[in-house]
Amino acid sequence: MGDVLAGFQTVWEFDTDSVLIRFERGIRTPKLLQALGERHIPYEALSAVDLTPGKRGTVVLRAVPRPGADPLMDVADGQLREGYDPYRLVLPAERASLAEYYAEEIRGVLGPGAGAVESHLVAAPPPPLSFKAYDGKASFDGKAVSFRWFWTGASSTKWKAGDQRFRIDELAGVEWRSPENRGSGGAAAKASGAAPAEDAEERGPDGQGPAAAKTAGARTSGAKGSGSRTSGAKGSGSRGSAPKGGGYGHLRLVPRGAEDEPAGRPDHDPAAVVFGMGYGLVHESLPFAAAVLEAVRASAPAPGVEGAPAPARSTAPARRDPADIADRIRHLGELHTAGLLTDEEFSAKKAELLAEL
């Protein structure tokens, strides 16, 4: 087509086989869209395109991605606020006829029965990526995900486990719960060999889905009920508990072979980082989760090929900063004094830290 359709904060540039969606930078543009910058969407990644009335004299043109085509939308699993939707173009109502024309043009190139796909067709943000959660820093270099705990936020369980490093070939999926969710934890989509459900779960009063997305590297399903998981309870106020303030979520890595195992509280799970207001923001944590999911799916064994058992989880490379080691030993002493570590555990951990100097 080679045409351009400009809306509020978003521009769609049409080509013969794809549409380039560009997001403007500015105070009115949501930070998630600014972080994404632009997205190249092949028409084969779409199942439909809709045109509906908007608010205050506008119309909304929205492309509907096929389940499994976009890692960002897979891992978001219906939790994004309306304004954060990267497939949404808002236009003045007087341009409704023009919007309908382009909608019909896109519908004309969509194949029949555009259902779920076996592999991603839309690229996730490229690594390296990192962000600060409430209890640690998460980093992804394209080959492995690392969690480095903060002594002011991480629980004693995570400190005992030590910093974590997960190779992509050790993982089966990613679970992301928006830090902007304000209600109690909802059910997570259970990973399975089936494709993601095409219909997102019913939204809550704030426009967000109640469920966290546990998206498997091979395929996912949006089934409700069985295999449900809830986010960690709000903290009691003690150091290392889940953040207070009403807005919290988490990012959890799902190891291979553990897809059907019940998950505990994310603030006590060494395979998870938790979010608080100002920590793990949507525009930081969601692109991170999408990039990890894309890498996980790319590394998954081909259908019909049984993968090798995942190697044991490895800890992150040792840090050699003496001040950091001293802080860790001091914190271990506090845990020992409080009775959270036995004499043997304290001595063993202290020896490990001293060996890093």
Image (cartoon, rainbow, N blue to C red):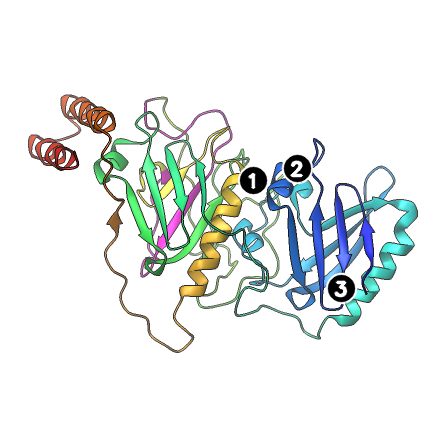
Residue 336: in magenta span: no
Identify which amino acid the numbered label 2 is placed on.
Pro
Percent position of residue 306, x then y:
33, 74
The residue that mark 2 highlights is: 30
The range drawn in magenta is 238-266
Q: Can residue 191 be seen in this view?
A: no
Estimate the spatial distance between the alpha carbons at disc 3 and disc 2, rounded to whole Å: 26 Å
Count of numbered badges drawn on the protein: 3
The residue that mark 3 highlights is: 15
Instruction: Judge left or right: residue 348 versus residue 152.
Output: left
Percent position of residue 302, x then y:
41, 74
Estimate the spatial distance between the alpha carbons at disc 1 and disc 2, rounded to whole Å: 9 Å
Instruction: Judge left or right: residue 338 versus residue 288.
Output: left
First along the sequence among labels 1 and 3: 3
Verify CB contact (< 8 Å) between mark 1 and mark 2: yes
Instruction: Judge left or right: residue 33 versus residue 321.
Output: right
Identify which amino acid the numbered label 1 is placed on.
His
Label 2 environment density (alpha carbons within 10 Å; few <14, some 14–19, many ≥20):
some
The residue that mark 1 highlights is: 283
